[in-house]
Image (cartoon, helix red, strand yellow):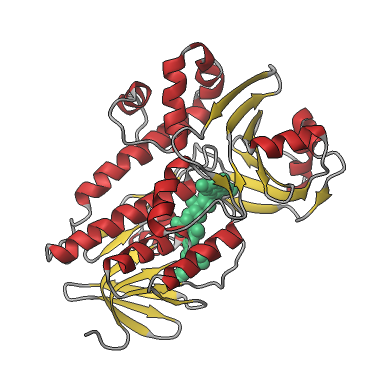
Amino acid sequence: MLDKNEYDIIIAGGGPAGTTAATLLAQYGYQVLLLEQGQHPRFHIGESMLPMADPIMKRLGIDWSAGNLKKGGAEFIDEKSGKRVYFPLQSMHRTYQVDRADFDEKMFNNAIKQGVNAHQQEKVTAVECGEDSAIITTEKATYQGKYFIDASGRNALMGRNNNTINKLDMLGKYALYRHYKLAITPTTAKLFESGNIEIITTEIGWIWCIPLSENRLSVGLVVQKEKASELKQDELFDSYIHASSRMTELLVDSVLLTNVRVEADFSYFNSQRFGLRYACCGDSAGFLDPVFSSGFFFAVKTAEVVADQVHRGFIENRLVDPELMLNSDKVYQTGFQTMFLMIERFYCSNIVENLFFESDREPRLKNEIIGLLSGDLWTETNSFQQGLLRGRNKLKN
Ligand SMILES: Cc1cc2nc3c(=O)[nH]c(=O)nc-3n(C[C@H](O)[C@H](O)[C@H](O)COP(=O)(O)OP(=O)(O)OC[C@H]3O[C@@H](n4cnc5c(N)ncnc54)[C@H](O)[C@@H]3O)c2cc1C
């Protein structure tokens, strides 16, 4: 029997990573405390999902078809050359474009339904992991756990405490984005029917165009190559959106739903993702870039890997082993490295122009790219992936 304020596992962060780890551990029968500094529903960017998150949603008991727009695939567009390429992403599993405020709340409530003790508006302020226990201090109380999971997103509690956050300067530098309500025209109706994310390359980065339910569109400009400009951020956003013929076509008679929002300095990895009685998952372990929509998938995938390994740690009486996560982290990193190498080549060697646009002529290559864009990152048969992993510029962990 545990005393009040004592838990098997304590988790900081009630986003997708934290709620996934919490729910899976509660399913195993552990006493889990989930601490979230905010209050759901809260806004979060990150709306386009990958199919390989679907098996995890099923494990959690979440029906993500409800209220969300089915995603068909991803289309890459270069308006200068007129080239386009489409990758269908529905062959393995279904996936969706979601409203994160509602969806994250749904995941949080689902965790509670499955037995997680969850507190909102309670920020973790200090973590001390020792031989005997993990002591977690918040603004309201002190708790004792047998294991601690850092799912604090880009706040990266443990990484920042340990000074192990490594910025990735060559990826996207900042993103400007806003939401619109579109008028229904034959063009917009086709987009909502397909549910495709569109990625339009520009000279300073790229534009995302994500159709959401109720005829809404999320549009973002990710800037990688900064050019000296007198423009304010919303003017910069508008200038690139208006310069795009595709965006102009879609936004005819649209209504603005939000002002321009900004996210900056989001690309990094944490070189110390686990240690004595703790592990990091989701963005607290690293976040790359939004271009291939992999953030949510990596968040729930790391959380699944960590939760299953913590369960093994309980069974094998190894919670105190600082290397409990060593092997599972190594496996996970194969997927994370692969995505990093694809994104690095997107920005630094124009993988879209040099390879994606050509892939329609090579069905095997096309299928291999579809696999990676779906989040199928742990097969041993993807020769395109093997080539990436043998090549240059891997992350140095
Ligand atoms: C511009 C941009 C666009 C993106 N687009 C996409 C996309 O289209 N598709 C996609 O899959 N991903 C996208 N992402 C990434 C995606 O949003 C994240 O990878 C995902 O939300 C990570 O989930 P998480 O649970 O790790 O972190 P979060 O979702 O950030 O959740 C962390 C939670 O921890 C809480 N927290 C933080 N500190 C504390 C503390 N000290 N105590 C208690 N609670 C705390 C926070 O309030 C938050 O609720 C995008 C990211 C950016 C920057």
Residue 349 relative to residue 380: left or right: right
Residue 59 relative to residue 217: left or right: left
Rendering quarter of residue 249: top right
> Is 124 above or below relative to 182?
below
Q: How many marks?
A: 0
**Which residue is located at x 37 percent, y 22 percent?**
384
Rendering quarter of residue 200: top right
Residue 359: x %, y % from top left: 50, 17
Rendering quarter of residue 18: bottom left
Residue 329: x %, y % from top left: 27, 48
Q: Say which quadrant the N terminus sits in.
A: bottom left
Name the residue at the top extreme. Answer: 361
Name the residue at the right extreme. Answer: 253
Please indicate, yes or no, whether residue 135 appears anywhere in the rendered image: yes
Name the residue at the bottom extreme. Answer: 4
Please indicate, yes or no, whether residue 272 appears anywhere in the rendered image: no
Residue 133: x %, y % from top left: 22, 75
Residue 332 relative to residue 216: left or right: left
**Which residue is located at x 23 percent, y 66 percent?**
277
Q: Say which quadrant the C terminus sits in.
A: top left
**Which residue is located at x 43 percent, y 64 percent?**
19
Residue 128 relative to residue 44: left or right: left
Residue situated in front as seen by the camera: 141 or 40: 40
Residue situated in front as seen by the camera: 120 or 212: 212
Residue 228: x %, y % from top left: 70, 37
**Which residue is located at x 37 percent, y 50 percent?**
301
